[in-house]
């Protein structure tokens, strides 16, 4: 605690006499939970794995590595937790939705390459690479705006409705849709298509849990839902003005939540 002592000059006595003491409490530094460090290390590990196992891609790997490093840093700068979803169902949907495709591609490349066999059709390769690049760049843009609220399981920290969140309520998921669609076009196998279909179903379930939580913590989220679609821009709906919604910190009305990654 920092003490601030104001002194006043008393002309009648010619002495310096202390006035009232104002106690100014400096804001307590937020301590990081162990899950913040665990999430940070997890995404750093993913970035390192990309560099080690795909060095032939070279500079084209940079956006993906940067994406994982921003995600890692987000765990250390995100705002305090207000509330999170309980139960194993939202956690299972979150963890599988985050890592199912990554693990499948990694294991298939090592043990069953035919499941992720590369196509030799030049048009599909070009189109797939273009979609992947658009998706990864849009993901970087979205993740930067979401860095103070990032988490894996459904959690409420701050409400972000600006930037890419004017385009879609879940722009990070939209970026993954573009990336994975681009990957599938370059590796158009039925097995990978099945895995991507399961992943998309998990994302839809994940969105339901996340939006239910956000509506509970942020009543103004309902108005935001009426203006912005879930995963794609909707032309019939009114465009969200930059000043219409702001990033807001939630009010934690008692009851501590045990944070998870």
Image (cartoon, rainbow, N blue to C red):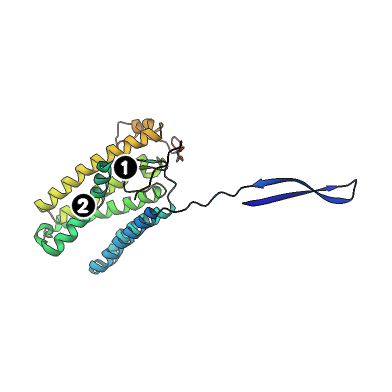
Q: Is residue 91 above or below residue 225?
A: below
Judge depth for marks 2 and 1 and give the one in front. 2
Q: Secondary structure at mark 2?
A: helix
Residue contact at pointers 2 and 1, CB within 8 angstroms: no
Q: Quadrant of residue 242?
A: top left
* Nearer-N-terminus badge (2/1): 2
Q: Tell me residue 186's x, y (percent).
A: 16, 56
| Percent of width and height locating residue 8 | 80, 47
- From the image, tell me which residue sits under label 1: 170
Q: CA distance from mark 2 to mark 1?
A: 19 Å
Residue with the mark numbered 2: 100
Please report the residue visible at 24 percent of the width from the left and 43 percent of the height from the top.
203
Q: Residue at x 38, y 57 (%)?
A: 37
Residue at image coords 9%, 60%: 114
Report how many numbered discs are placed on residues in the image: 2
Decide if residue 8 is on the left or right side of residue 257: right
Q: Which mark is residue 12?
A: none
Q: Is residue 231 visible?
A: no
Could you tell me which secondary element the residue under label 1 belongs to?
loop
Q: Is residue 58 visible to us here?
A: yes
Find residue 92 and report its horizontal and vertical position in percent. Answer: 24, 46
Nearest the viewer among 146 and 34 is: 34
């Amino acid at each position: 605690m920092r003490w601030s002592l104001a002194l006043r000059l008393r002309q009648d006595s010619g002495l310096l006499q202390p006035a009232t003491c104002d106690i100014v409490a400096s804001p307590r530094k937020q301590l990081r939970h162990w899950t913040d460090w665990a999430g940070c290390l997890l995404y750093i590990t993913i970035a390192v794995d990309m560099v080690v196992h795909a060095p032939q891609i070279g500079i084209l790997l940079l956006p993906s590595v940067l994406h994982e490093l921003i995600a890692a840093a987000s765990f250390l700068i995100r705002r305090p937790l207000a509330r999170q979803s309980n139960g194993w169902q939202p956690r299972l949907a979150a963890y599988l939705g985050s890592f199912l495709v990554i693990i499948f591609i990694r294991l298939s490349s090592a043990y069953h390459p035919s499941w992720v066999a590369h196509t030799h059709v030049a048009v599909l390769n070009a189109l797939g690479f273009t979609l992947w690049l658009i998706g990864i760049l849009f993901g970087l843009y979205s993740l930067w705006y979401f860095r103070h609220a990032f988490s894996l399981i459904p959690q409420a920290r701050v409400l972000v409705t600006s930037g890419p969140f004017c385009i879609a309520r879940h722009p990070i998921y939209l970026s993954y849709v573009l990336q994975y669609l681009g990957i599938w076009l370059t590796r158009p196998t039925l097995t990978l298509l099945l895995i991507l279909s399961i992943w998309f179903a998990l994302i839809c379930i994940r969105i339901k849990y996340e939006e239910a939580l956000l509506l509970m913590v942020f009543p103004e989220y309902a108005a935001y839902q009426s203006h912005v679609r879930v995963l794609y821009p909707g032309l019939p709906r009114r465009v969200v003005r930059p000043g219409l919604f702001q990033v807001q910190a939630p009010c934690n009305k008692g009851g501590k939540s045990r944070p998870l990654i």
